[in-house]
Image (cartoon, rainbow, N blue to C red):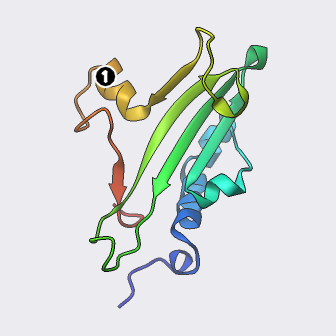
Amino acid sequence: MNTEHPMQARQSGQDYFQSVLVTVVGGAFAAAGYHLAEEPMQWLGGRYRFIKPLAGNWRAIIEFQVLTYTDNAYTGQQPSRFRVTLIRSDQPGGKPSSQPGYVHRTLSQLVVSDFGVAILPSPDHWWPFSDTTS
């Protein structure tokens, strides 16, 4: 019996993740002034960026990177996983900047290292999932 959601059966893992991502956080991010960057080549690799313009040519970026695995003999039944990176940069595409306001931190680094909250196994944590309920 196939337990996939009907939309998941018709879309690639990355496309399905994007659909769920936009459904779950898209409205809240839009209300906060973020928009999903139109980067189809990056989407193919599982990278989705929500960007908010800031004063002085700066941008705030919330980046989701997903690694999707199809359950087969070669993946070793690994769950798919994603992580979130927060970037503030005055450079195109969120590239590194020499300015003091530049920030590039994963959400797990921020929680574990910066805030000292040990709710994740490490500062380099990827959130695993196998379907929309996990």
- Residue 114 image offset from top left, x and y in percent: 35, 19
- Residue 126 image offset from top left, x and y in percent: 35, 46
Q: Residue at x 68, y 56 (%)?
A: 41
Query: In this rendering, would 79 be left or right of 89?
Result: left
What SS does tag 1 mark?
helix
Mark 1 nearby-residue class (10 Å; few <14, some 14–19, many ≥20)? some
Q: Which picture quadrant has residue 51?
A: top right
Q: Is residue 33 visible?
A: no
In the picture of the structure, the residue carrying the numbered disc 1 is 113
Query: In this rendering, would 91 be left or right of 6?
Result: right
Q: Residue at x 36, y 28 (%)?
A: 109
In the rendered image, the residue lying farthest to the top is 100
Quadrant of the snapshot with the C terminus: bottom left
- Residue 91 image offset from top left, x and y in percent: 70, 24
Quadrant of the snapshot with the N terminus: bottom left
Q: Compared to 134, does 59 lie above or below?
A: above
- Residue 123 image offset from top left, x and y in percent: 31, 32
Q: Compared to 37, does 8 lie above or below?
A: below
Q: Which picture quadrant has residue 19?
A: bottom right
Q: Residue at x 39, y 67 (%)?
A: 131
Q: Which picture quadrant has residue 119?
A: top left
Q: Residue at x 37, y 63 (%)?
A: 133
Question: In this figure, what is the number of numbered marks?
Answer: 1
Q: Is residue 69 visible?
A: yes
Q: Compared to 13, does 119 lie above or below?
A: above
**Type of amino acid at the residue the image marks with label 1:** Ser
Query: In this rendering, would 24 be left or right of 89?
Result: left
- In the foreground, 96 or 12: 96
Q: Compared to 38, does 117 lie above or below?
A: above
Query: In this rendering, would 113 be left or right of 131?
Result: left
